[in-house]
Amino acid sequence: MNELQKIENKTEKSGMQIFAELITELSSSTKTNDKLQSLVDYFAIAPDADKVWVIALFGGRRPRRAVNLRLMREWCLEIIDIPDWLFGECHHTVGDFSETLALLLAETKILEHQNESLSYYLEKFISLEKEDDSIKKKFIVESWQKMNPEEKFVFNKLITGSFRVGVSQKTIVNALSKVFNVSPSEIAHRISGNWDPLTTSFNDLLSESISVTDFSKPYPFYLAYAIDDKVENLGKPELWQAEWKWDGIRGQMIKRNHELFVWSRGEELMTDKFPEYFILKDLLPDGVVLDGEIIPSINGKPLPFAVLQTRIGRKNISKKQLQEAPISFFAYDLLEYNYEDWREKTLLERRKKLEEIISSFKSNSIRLSEKINFESWDELAEIRKRSRDKNSEGIMLKRKDSVYKVGRKRGDWWKWKIDPLTIDCVMVYAQKGSGRRSNLYTDYTFAVKDGDQLITFTKAYSGLTDKEFAEIDQFVKRNSLEKFGPVRTVKPQLVFEIAFEGIAASNRHKSGVALRFPRMNRWRKDKTADEINTLDDLKEMLKIYGKQIIL
Amino acid sequence: MPNLISFTDKGLFCEAGSFYIDPWLPVDRAVITHGHSDHARFGNQFYLCHKFTKPILELRLGKNNYQTLDWNETIFLSGVKISFHPAGHIIGSSQIRLEYKNEVWVISGDYKTEDDGISGKFEPVKCNVFITESTFGLPIYNWKPQQEIYNDMIDWISKNKENGKASILIAYSLGKSQRVLQALKETTQTIYAHGAIYNMQQNFIDAGWDLNRVVRITPETPKELLKETVVIAPPGAEGTSWMKKFYPYSIGVCSGWMKVRGNVRRRNVDAGFALSDHADWNSLLMTVKETGAEKVFVTHGFQSAFSRYLNEKNIALSAEVKTQFGYEDEETNSPLEIKNEEV
């Protein structure tokens, strides 16, 4: 094939085909630079409407699921004529529903290859949402028959869930920046905020003017890494500002054009979820953007994250919840003042203005996240030990002369978290993971001792190396006692140290406790199942650290 | 009458002929389907195998009491009639047909139905009882025609070249490597190989096979020579310092497991080629039907699913059997347990 033919072939490809190839490339490449290059290539040739959707999809915006998974499974079984249990076996082995469908349907005859764009399908999904199942079925089954296996996979993915291809928002931003020769922070700002891929054109999205008219648009967050060195090595203590690290939802509060917008770090507009904030629309000056923590608190003392969980995800908030879990905004930074971008000013300047703004009125809905006064690193280390009393996860360290950067950066901001709580327990159930852990038993349930019984109390699926997971997988396969669907019960033999950030009483769990952020800290090969902790140990921890909240 | 084959802790046992097929513990008389180490092991007093399998066994197990047969040739052991039939899995791989008192049993060993041009073309053998492998016995595993996969590999290699990278293909030294080299036959470039693969390839060439020659990589091989080349390496070399020499490179794994994206990602490699030397789902089903067997025992792989499917669809009366096969050529999901099962 000569070069010219190659190019012609490339341009003949449909938007969906190019997108399927992009996904295949992204999911198989292991290096960020390769991924970046794939995206750059994609943005250079894809149709404009498709680019808008790709930015939206990788930023976590997707149309609502138009088709029930159960139905998709039924339609697939009809086409290939296999029993339902066999689909189940395949699904457990593949670990991904969309891919299972695509593999099972790989052999179905291609009617005539359909050359449609990505945006065609996504718009079709949106219009299908309200249609009858029979119409949905016709569209989906026919589409399957007109696609190659790679397209079938992404088609199913678009309907069912998110693409986990290891592409961060940062990579997307860098790719766009490279293709359109605009600075990454500018791109990040332009593609954030409240826009609808259905009605936004690619030019609108990336054009300068749009950010002026979209008053809701947040700034990209500046995120800190955990400190991996001794704090003493950060230099003189007086160069640093210390704050408590709160366990809430990182958020941005925007007051512009007499309107209030609250964004989470996940770029979700959460304004309506927290009626407590409505009053701030009148109290805050116009043209202001604050960075802080969305957190429930009473008299300035934060409540545990579990309390916040009872609030988010609910459409209607009861009066009781408003009383028991009032949400506040703990402000710690100022990004915009008087419609002016303040991110390039020093933390010292920003903080001073922030304090001015917050102290100009009084409301329980917002407060200043307090600074910690300290003279020496030793003193700060002592203070840090009291983090749990404050319902804090530790300390944030920020250089006083630091500007507000974009994304996760090393150097000027650090998280200095407290050591987690730990408990030794034994693995009793295992389940196969998904994605890159498909067909490997990586999701485990753990138990502590209660007399001669074992009581399950938590699940965990992270914290081990691939090698350890492979080893445990072998153990599970050789030592399973029973099989319940995808779950296997295993001989209670492997002991793990589970680390967690908090503990709360719970009547949903048999053990009576719920853990925050449980993960496997290490595999205690040196311990036998007889040497694990007991339910009484857990209850003791609950007494000391537990927030007496009944979930 | 007892079954012609029983499943014992040493392996598949034919009591009437007093021999074992691919035993996993040392026995007096072993009939061997093919040369992979989970099927052909040390320590047997006597080995009966296909004539192409003998050089492989000699390379791996050294001098032993070997006797060979050609395909379709017949021998009697204590009154049991034995013949070998091509299984298409690797060079020399054979299905074993046993006939005794008007009953025919066929033990498939490992097999693939697509003709790769070197392993012999698979022939379904009529029988009453068929013992089949099921390494890829789920309907998610259906292979693309090999030529398409070969083309994908060649495209991948040229793309790597354009990007200034070497292409390292991970393939098991016995079987998969010969096939990959077969795929690259049309390309004109020199192909380099890890010592294990070089030895195996040379062994075949010495035995008279017309196969591609490969250049062995030694500590003395200059790095400059290896720039942008194609290298074949066994799975054991992956991720070791041996690979440093080829930097910058892309790694591609050739294995049926690469059909599932999660496996490619977990291996943390750049490309996966679902090139398998085992029968896919459709071929397994087709083969079972073509043997005309009324009873089918399903061994190593997805035995419970495949056997249940055969029963439910009334294709054959089927039961699953646990064996110790399935360690070597395609890394299996897990080592299988030893289990005594009288069927």
Image (cartoon, rainbow, N blue to C red):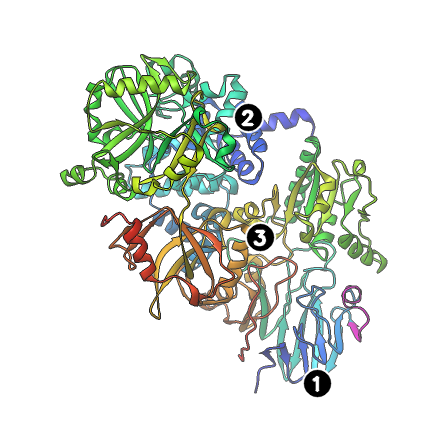
Residue B200: x and y in percent read 78, 57
Q: Are marks 3 and 2 in contact (CB under 8 Å)?
A: no
Instruction: Give the residue type at disc 3.
Output: Trp
Q: CA distance from mark 3 to mark 2?
A: 30 Å
Q: Is residue B61 magenta?
A: yes
Residue B280: x and y in percent read 57, 56
Say which quarter of the image contains residue A277: top left
Which residue bears the numbered disc 3?
Answer: B257
Label number found at residue A40: 2
Callout 3: 10 Å neighbours few (<14), some, many (20+)? Answer: many
Residue B112: x and y in percent read 64, 59
User: Does residue B220 sit above or below A35 in this rendering?
Assistant: below
Residue range in magenta is B56-68
Q: Is residue A117 visible?
A: no
For the point 69% across and 77% down, the residue is B26
Q: Secondary structure at mark 3?
A: helix
Q: Chain of mark 1?
A: B
Q: CA distance from mark 3 to mark 1?
A: 41 Å
Q: Chain of mark 3?
A: B
